Amino acid sequence: MDLSLFWMLLPLATVAWGQYGDYGYPYQQYHDYGDDGWVNLNRQGFSYQCPHGQVVRAVRSIFSKKEGSDRQWNYGCMPTPQTLGEPTECWWEEINRAGMEWYQTCSNNGLVAGFQSRYFESVLDREWQFYCCRYSKRCPYSCWLTTEYPGHYGEEMDMVSHSYNYYIRGATTTFSAVERDRQWKFIMCQMTDYDCEFASV
C-alpha cells in the first residue's frame, strides 16, 4: 500500500473508531440521534415519535438563555426485544402544563416512545406530552429514578440509558422560576416477559 494513501486514510479510521469504538457501553449502537440535528428550533413546538416497535433510549438537549430561555431537543430510539413483542396500542398522554413541576408515567403500563412539546413565551417554558406504547399485557417492575438531567439548570443535557431491559416509563421534573429551566429525572423500569393481570402499575 502506498504510504501517502495510508496517511490520508488514518484520520478517517481514527474518527470512525472514536464514533463506533467500544467504550464499555454494550448497547452503544442504540445511542443514535439520527443526523445529530435538533427536532426543534428555539421557541417552536415539536412532535417526535420513535419508529414502530422502538422506544426512547436517549435524550439530548442544549439551553439558550438569549433564545427565550428555551432548549433544543433530540432523541435516540432503540428496538424493543422480541420478548416484549409488538406494541398493541399507542397514545398521547395528558398534557403537563408549562411553568409547573410535574410527575407522570405512561398509563396502562406503557413505555415512552416519543415526546410532544409547545413553547409558551408568557412563562418562558414548555408544556409536555409523552407518546406511550403498550406491549401486550406486560407489567413494569424494579423501577427507579435517574439522577437529575441536566445536573444544573442551563447546562447541556445528555441522558443515555445503557441498562439493557430498562425502559423509560415517564419522568418527574422541577422548574426554576429564576433560571426558567427544567431538570428531569427519568423513571426507568424493567418489563415482565410474561403477561400480568394489572391494568396499570
Image (tube, rainbow, N blue to C red):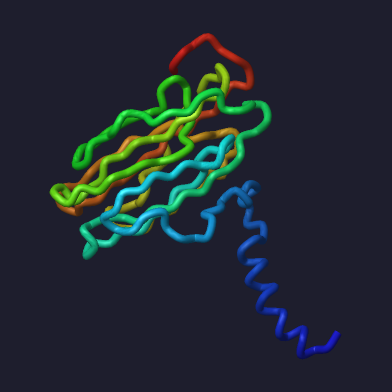
Viewport quadrant of the N terminus: bottom right
The spot of residue 7 in percent (x, y) is 73, 85
Does 72 sit left or right of 140 as displayed? left
Q: Nearer the viewer, residue 109 or 93?
A: 93
Residue at image coords 56%, 53%: 32
The spot of residue 91 in percent (x, y) is 43, 28
Looking at the image, which residue sits at the far right?
1
Quadrant for residue 34, please give it.
bottom right
- Above or below for 45 versus 81: below
**Res. 54 in view:** yes
- Above or below for 69 versus 87: below
Does 43 sit left or right of 34 as displayed? left
- Above or below for 59 versus 80: below
Quadrant for residue 137, please give it.
top right
Q: Nearer the viewer, residue 169 or 132?
A: 132
The spot of residue 8 in percent (x, y) is 71, 84
Residue at image coords 76%, 90%: 4
The spot of residue 197 in percent (x, y) is 53, 9
Residue at image coords 60%, 48%: 30
Does 5 sit left or right of 118 as displayed? right
Residue at image coords 31%, 46%: 183
Quadrant for residue 114, please give it.
top left
Does 11 sit left or right of 61 as displayed? right
**Res. 159 in view:** no
Viewport quadrant of the C terminus: top left
